[in-house]
Image (cartoon, rainbow, N blue to C red):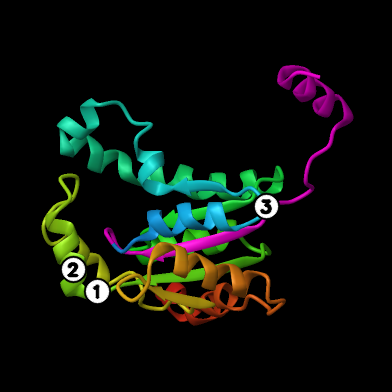
Amino acid sequence: MRLYEQITDIVKKGKKRTKGKIIFLNGTSSSGKTSLARALQRELEEPFLYYSSDTFATFLPEKCFQDLSLLIAEIPNLLSGFHTSLPVLVQAGNNLIVDHVLQEKDWLLQCLEVLEGEEILFVGVTCPISVLEEREKKRVDREEGQARYQSSRLHEGCVYDIEIDSSKMSPEEGAKLVKEFYLSGKQFTGWNETKVKLKDYKAEL
């Protein structure tokens, strides 16, 4: 049976996962999230979609990247769409590796809200600022100072199940550690602990 015939056959039979799983990577620009995510896709037996806020932004027209005022104006709508799409994809049976930069507390709070009740392995991707800045200089798609600004904000209030320092290991080594935790049978508690920790912040809004 050819590929397109197999697709028709499986659609007719209605075979799909009832619910997907989430590995959520949070780290600054240039911290190594993308490399870790790609290594995880290779390492894990089950297929996982790589779902990145940066990739989501590429859906915007080119003019938004030529006129930063247009891009900035679209960011709230863009990220709201990205966040609210997460539970839809998971509930449709897709496994996700989410790559995000939660530099704003409101972004984290929105993710916590829309992913209520989901089982999430929360991974902090870290790196010393000196290494981040060195990597940043080599990238043409990053502004100087971006990583430093983000690093002072995005890990605050987050409780991770596991942290990966990309300056101390290769993406493949990091992926093996995440996979080991993922398959260990340990309860994923970081996401819910983060939610509890941020209750006071939300009450102040």
The picture quadrant where one finds residue 26 is bottom left
The disc placed on residue 66 is none
Q: Is residue 4 visible?
A: yes
Q: CA distance from mark 3 to mark 2?
A: 35 Å
Mark 3 crowd level (few <14, some 14–19, many ≥20, 10 Å Cα): few
Regarding mark 1 in the picture, which secondary structure is present there?
A: loop
Nearest the viewer among 62 and 73 is 62
Quadrant holding the N terminus:
top right
Q: Is residue 4 magenta?
A: yes
Decide which of tag 3 and tag 2 comes sooner along the chain: 3
**Element carrying mark 3:** loop
Percent x, y of residue 135: 19, 60
190 in relation to 145, above or below: below
Residue 46's tag is: 3
From the top left corner, tell me how far across and down residue 91 is, in percent.
70, 48
Q: Position of residue 67 (x, y in %)?
A: 15, 33
* Residue 77 in view, yes or no: no
Quadrant assignment for the C terminus: bottom left
Left or right of 63, for residue 111: right
Quarter location, residue 182: bottom right
Looking at the rendering, the stretch of residues picked out in magenta corresponds to: 1-30
Give the residue number, with chain letter if any, for mark 2: 148
Vertical arrangement, residue 25 with respect to residue 6, above or below: below
Q: Residues within 10 Å of mark 1 (few under 14, many from 20)?
A: few
Task: Find disc 1 in the rendering and name its residue.
Answer: 152
Instruction: Please name the amino acid that badge 1 sits on.
Output: Ser
Marks 2/1: CA–CA distance: 6 Å
